[in-house]
Image: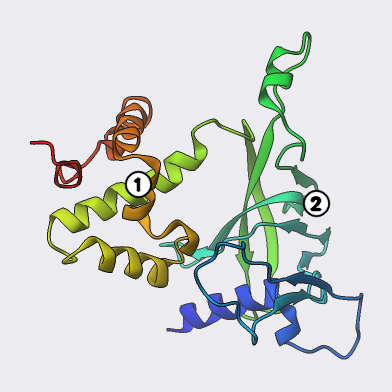
Amino acid sequence: MLKCTLLFVFQVSFCMSTLFAQQEKLSEPWIWTSEPPEDCPFERSTEIVGVALTKNYRHYELKSGGSIADTWYPTWAANDTLYSPWTDGRCPRLDGSYDQSQSGHIAYNKEIVYNSSGKLPLQATTGQAAMVGDNPLDMHIYSLGTYSGDPAPADAQDRLVLSMVNEAVACLADGVVSDADLLDAGVIFGTGFAPFRGGPINYARERGLGEVITKLRALSAGHGHRFEPHSGWSDLTGDD
């Protein structure tokens, strides 16, 4: 329970530091307004209208200097230590040096980069860091190293989304949920699946069941058996 509490407070303080007022205001907050898509089926909230990032707690540091990066996802490991990936910035190492990370050029175009003579593809760099301390507002963070890769793999979205869709089909086929509508609603409200997509089963139907199955088979061939289409797809397509 203590770990869960510490992790929750750390994430909230790191991303929504307006919740922890501080006497000295270091900078004007940056307001991230809530702008749902026009076809969102849910009414726009009148209470949660945005997030204010004050930057007041961007002082996480070692004696060698500060960690200035984003996209942190801290989780507890089996050795009772908090670890997190990070990107777009710098993070100090224990020896006093710094690791740098960037997620690729904002206007990245794979065709231009790959086909330009004499140029190598841009590389996205992701870091891994350890977070030490018991006070979520005074953690010591140090980099464990970085690794690089293509910032825009062609099948990244499908590898993330279709694995969830495939598991949803498995749940439906195994009788975990009685019907597709309940499953879609549960995944939307329980996991945050994009509401305007209508849930994983509705997403698969709108995209085309055959196309999704074909893509899963291709992913299975390229990335492993975990993407193999579940036998329950036949219940949706009507195939034997």
Residue depicted at 82% across the width and 76% down the height: 54
N-terminal of the pair, mark 1 or mark 2, is 2
Q: Is mark 2 on a helix, strand or loop?
A: loop
Residue depicted at 71% across the width and 58% down the height: 70
Q: Does residue 62 sit above or below 89 in this rendering?
A: below
Task: Name the residue tied to disc 2.
Answer: 96
Task: Name the residue tied to disc 1.
Answer: 204
Q: What amino acid is at disc 1? A: Ala
Residue depicted at 82% across the width and 61% down the height: 66
Q: In which quadrant will I find the C terminus?
A: top left
Quarter-wise, where is residue 16 in the image? bottom right
Residue 68: horizontal and vertical position, in percent?
A: 79, 58
Display coloring: rainbow
Residue depicted at 70% across the width and 22% down the height: 121
Q: Horizontal placement of 164 versus 228: left or right?
A: right
Q: In which quadrant will I find the N terminus?
A: bottom left
Q: What amino acid is at disc 2? A: Gly
Residue furthest to the front: 39
Q: Does residue 227 sit above or below 71 in this rendering?
A: above
Quarter-wise, where is residue 126 in the image? top right
Residue furthest to the top: 117
Residue furthest to the left: 240
Q: Horizontal placement of 8 versus 212: left or right?
A: right
Which circle, 1 or 2, is nearer the viewer?
A: 1
